[in-house]
Image (cartoon, rainbow, N blue to C red):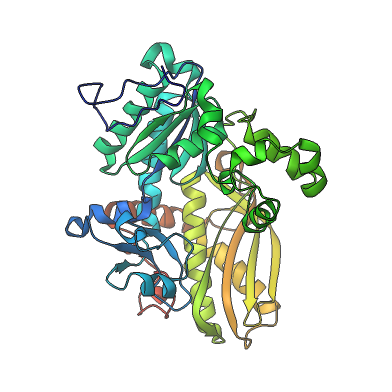
Amino acid sequence: MSRKQVLRSEPGQGSGPGRAAPADDTGCPILHVDMDAFFASVELLERPELKGTPVIIGAAGARGVVLSATYEARRYGVHSAMPMTRARRLCPQAVVIPPSHGKYSEVSKGVMEIFHSVTPEVEPIASDEAFLDVSGALRRLGSPARIGELIRAEVVERHGITCSVGVASSKFVAKLASRHCKPDGLLVIPADGVVDFLHPLPVAALWGVGERTEQALVRLGIKTVGDLAHVPPSTLQREFGAVGAHLAALAWGRDDRRVTPHVPDKSIGAEETFSHDVDDPDAIRRELLRLSERVAARLRGGGHVGRTVSVKLRRSDFTTITRARTLREATDVAKEIYATACDLYGAAGLERVRLRLVGVRVENLRPVGTATRQLGLGERETGWREAEMAMDKAMRRFGPEAVRPASLVRPPFDGMDL
């Protein structure tokens, strides 16, 4: 078998006439599974008439950014994190859909459940992608490539969206493989074919090579991974310090990092950039409420409570101020988070200062089952947590806008992602 041979396949299909023989996945227990255009794919489930057309997910304001785009829009150069104004210039015919984070969270939870049904060794790195070590599932489910096919078929069957799977001997190569077989593909990089796969790639494909590092490498005549692989490690260390040693290892496919499951969240937050600078305290507080609701829902969804609430306030001159307060007891209640956020905003002395961004974050997280609430003498339970949990159920069933605080029912402030 050629060392360069790989397998790209569709869900549920086996080998057959006209198809390449499966690549050797022996010694390739690491899978990187990545949903294809995740936010856009979830939105199109409710808008099937838009399939096959350019669609962009993101806030439509002047300062909005692209969260996701269909592959039809990407052909015009649109990509995630691009300013929405530029995306609209590149692809004026695209349909722009505001994001619905509740829907994405629900589908993400379902996808992660599929991963955990295969192996407990799952390391989520975003809501739409994860590494899996399937070493312990081979006897039960078959080869790594077979397991990748089963995952892809299950994601389509349960959620109606597609994913791409990279199969390799290391996390670094598996992630590159999933990127190379997008959309809706599976790519195996045999353990003895890693160098042949890596060396023709542009040097920017390596983890740790950002725009500035790439420019510095190109100035040295290093354009591909193969070019970099043949530079003495001492030269790379002299030019780039510790990063140089890291790049030298990756250029030969050396990546010893293990799949690390159950990495606890250190904090949960949300923020919003306004379409234009805002100095109206009521508008700011409405946004703090919306963000507090989102953060609290994510806390409850993940089974967390937190003791420290912080706000992030960015002025029109890009000066950023953060303020934090540690509560007496941990919470996952939006009402308590919002009250603290408003206090911090008021104490910052920015109530008449023009702001371009606000954010709310909860830190010092712990599992909800380990937290207790100590009532004071004569103090009653408020019932707010139970009410908000009922809201969670309603929104899961009827959509993210089914139940909202009254102050957020009014027409949204321009630039707010409601």
Height in image: 169 above or below 199?
above
Q: Residue at x 74, y 44 (%)?
A: 243
Q: Is residue 375 visible?
A: no
Q: Is residue 219 visible?
A: yes
Q: Position of residue 214 (x, y in %)?
A: 64, 53
Q: Which quarter of the rendering shows the C terminus?
A: bottom left
Q: Nearer the viewer, residue 249 or 328?
A: 249
Q: Position of residue 38 (x, y in %)?
A: 37, 50
Question: For the view shown, which residue lies furthest in the top direction?
Answer: 139
Q: Which corner quadrant of the image does residue 113 belong to?
A: top left
Question: For the view shown, which residue lies furthest in the front direction?
Answer: 221
Q: Which corner quadrant of the image does residue 66 belong to?
A: bottom left
Q: Position of residue 112 (x, y in %)?
A: 42, 37
Height in image: 18 above or below 73?
above
Height in image: 237 above or below 279?
above
Looking at the rendered structure, the number of numbered marks drawn on it comes to: 0
Height in image: 103 above or below 413?
above
Q: Residue at x 60, y 73 (%)?
A: 342
Q: Residue at x 33, y 61 (%)?
A: 73
Q: Which quarter of the rendering shows the N terminus?
A: top left
Question: For the view shown, which residue lies furthest in the left direction?
Answer: 49
Q: Nearer the viewer, residue 133 or 83?
A: 83
Q: Residue at x 34, y 32 (%)?
A: 8
Q: Position of residue 220 (x, y in %)?
A: 71, 51
